[in-house]
Image (spheres, helix red, strand yellow):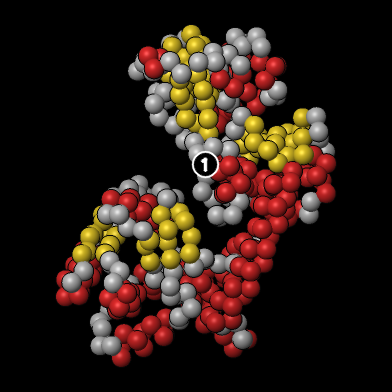
Amino acid sequence: MALLHLLHKLCTLHGTRLRVVTVDHGLRPEAASEAQMVADVCSKLGLLHDVLHWEGWDGSGNLQDAARRARYGMMADWGRRHDVEAIAVGHSADDQAETVLMRLARRSGVDGLSGMKRRLVMEGMTWVRPLLGASRSDLRDYLIQSDVPWIEDPSNKNENFERIRARKVLEALEPLGITVCGLAEVADNMLEARKALEWQTFLAARDSIYVNGGAVVVDDRKMRLMPDEVQRRLLVRAMNWISGEAYPARRQAVMSVLKGLRRGQAGTAEGCHARRVGGAVWIFREFNAVANVRSTVDVLWDGRWRITSSDPGALASDLEVRALGEEGLAQCPDWRSCGRPHPVLLSTPSIWHKDELLSAPLAGTGQNWHAEVDGGDETFFAALLTH
């Protein structure tokens, strides 16, 4: 509610269009009336307001995580429908401190302890958190002084949730000087360290990496000279770019792959495969992750491959894109001339008509067809600076 009123004043002052959205997760009977309360406030302020209803939870897994993912996804879709350029959310310094504390419990590194970013791009939408520097008590004082009513979420007292337990621990730690402001400052310090590491990782990538057939290829000698943390970041970013996963692979899994590479062993994590071939480390899609992925030629295959043909009449609806696999590669007599290792080619896209292989663009068969990573190879390097 504080965010709503502050942004209304700011946007009125600068002539910026403001629209409001509320997500009703359907988890509490009071949620509908709370959403209506927001709608009434927006009506008085002359603001358009929409309510989105979530019905996607099946009762399994982590409720808060599932609700958060759904909330951001629904709001991003809503924003695109209404030509919204950015969405502001109301996280405060307390939320930042709780996040740092929870990540400390998970033994997080620099990225985790840098907390939540003030600005990020996620789900194809720009998100901003303008209140990260304000405490909850600051915001309550503002609402009281402005005579603005608000509703306390009863789940804020439910200690079944990790964040609420962290909130209680923060209260107990305050006599030791571990305060909301202190932990928020730690997050700011870690964010600066994170920025420096990301920049060094980007420079290292530009010096040692190229993209080949959707795989990330690293000069082995140069990789060995990098600090361990830069090696880890490069591997994580490569896996994210290849798999399309929004969240990084677990540190333990990534470090296990790195240790294996140093011993000359291949490794897998997050649906990706990494192995040394000659003087390079190839990071590519694991075949098992895409063995059953099928699509028509007019949609992105595996969420990243765009298939086109130089023959306009070739785009028949009964064609199918699937991973090349051993069966398909056996039908590509000239695959060695493409310069890509055998394991890499297995997970590349190929075009089939029933059981007949028509083309394997990355294995040198059927050259009237083309397969390109959506957005081009440069999206890998761009992703290094946008996480």
The N terminus appears in which quarter of the rendering? bottom left
- Vertical order, 362 against 305 (above or below): above
Query: Which of the 4 image quadrants contains residue 300?
Result: top left
Q: Can residue 62 be seen from the camera position used here?
A: no
Q: Closest to the observer: 184 or 67?
A: 184
- Vertical order, 25 against 319 (above or below): below
Q: Position of residue 383 (x, y in %)?
A: 57, 49
Q: Closest to the observer: 269 or 63?
A: 269
Q: Position of residue 109 (x, y in %)?
A: 66, 62
Query: Which of the 4 image quadrants contains residue 159?
Result: bottom left
- Vertical order, 74 against 217 (above or below): below
Q: Position of residue 46 (x, y in %)?
A: 18, 72
Circle 1 residue = 244
Q: How many marks?
A: 1
Residue furthest out toward the bottom = 145
Q: Residue, x 16% and y 75% (percent of image)?
A: 44
Q: Closest to the observer: 224 or 269?
A: 224
> Is 5 on the left-hand or right-hand side of 328?
left
The C terminus appears in which quarter of the rendering? bottom right
Q: Residue, x 59% and y 81% (percent of image)?
A: 182
> Is 172 on the left-hand or right-hand side of 148?
right
Q: Position of residue 139 (x, y in %)?
A: 38, 82
**Residue type at the position of mark 1:** Gly
Q: Residue, x 39% and y 26% (percent of image)?
A: 298
Query: Which of the 4 image quadrants contains residue 115?
Result: bottom right
> Is 32 on the left-hand or right-hand side of 226?
left
Label 1 sits on a secondary structure element that is loop
Q: Residue, x 77% and y 39% (percent of image)?
A: 219
Q: Can residue 365 be seen from the camera position used here?
A: yes
Question: Circle 1: is it few (<14), some (14-19), or many (20+) Cα within 10 Å?
Answer: some
